Amino acid sequence: MAASFITILGLLLRGVACGLIIAAPVGPVNVLCVQRTLSKGWRSGLLSGLGSALADTLYGAIASFSISFVIAFLVREEFWIRFFGGLILIGIGVSYFIRRPQPVEDRRTGHSDYASTFLLTLTNPTTVLSFLAVLAALRLGEQRNGFLTLLIVVGIFVGAMLWWLILTGIVHRFRDKFSDRALMQINRIGGLAIGLFGVITLWFSRRSPP
């Protein structure tokens, strides 16, 4: 029984590590979560992180359960997924760049906070390949029964959400120190960064023509 508990705990912790490894690298969703935490409050930033974590968990489940036909579809349609994702990122970048400064206050959040980051995270279909690599590195790539594999997927979600809790918590801690002028500059820098990610996404889509 003890060995079984240790096995379960080990799989769960390695799943958490996998979620952290995938979520933590700086990307457009990280920039967007920081922007929303500063401009709309911690709840908005965390909901944005939730959307990304759900998409990461979906890709992690596809990789963990080795759903080969889905993986093949994502790789085959990589061009169009990246193409539309790049256009969305450019649009978001432009909107943030031209946005007027607003008071630093908690504002209402809605489904769009997590829906947008969920879709943005899904526009990188090669994430599932990253999960395959990380799972192999953490010795999680071999076949297991459904329950143990599900534990890994749960760990991936917990790890991803842990990252978003840490990131948005740190940003929220210092958000009161930003003036309207500083927020305008942050919006412009963030808008440029998100737009640049969009341009890069479009560029990489050219390398996988339909």
Image (tube, rainbow, N blue to C red):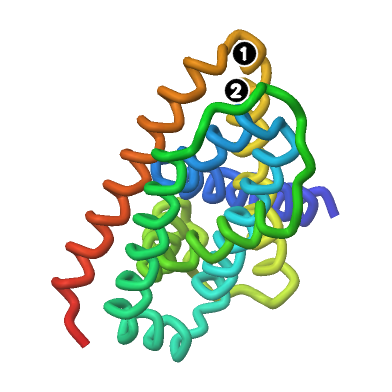
At 61% from the left and 73% from the top, the residue drawn is: 144
207 left or right of 186 in image: left
Q: How far apart, in angstroms, are the residues tagged by discs 2 and 1?
A: 6 Å
172 left or right of 202 in image: right
At 47% from the left and 49% from the top, the residue drawn is: 22
- Mark 2 vs 1: CB contact within 8 A: yes
180 versus 114 height, above or below: above
Q: Which mark is residue 146?
A: none
- Extreme top residue here? 177
93 left or right of 152 in image: left
Nearer to me, 6 or 81: 81
- Extreme bottom residue here? 69
Q: Residues within 10 Å of mark 2 (few under 14, many from 20)?
A: some
Question: Residue 52: x percent and y percent?
Answer: 58, 54
Residue type beneath disc 2: Val
Tag count in the figure? 2
Nearer to me, 38 or 183: 183
Nearer to me, 72 or 123: 123
142 versus 38 height, above or below: below
Question: Residue 49: x percent and y percent?
Answer: 62, 46
At 62% from the left and 21% from the top, the residue drawn is: 170
At 75% from the left and 38% from the top, the residue drawn is: 43
Residue type beneath disc 1: Phe
Q: Which mark is residue 174?
A: 1
Q: Quadrant of residue 157?
A: bottom right
Q: Quadrant of residue 149?
A: bottom right
Quadrant placement of the C terminus: bottom left
Q: Residues within 10 Å of mark 1 (few under 14, many from 20)?
A: few
Q: Report which residue position mark 2 lands on.
A: 171
Q: Is disc 1 placed on a helix, strand or loop? A: helix
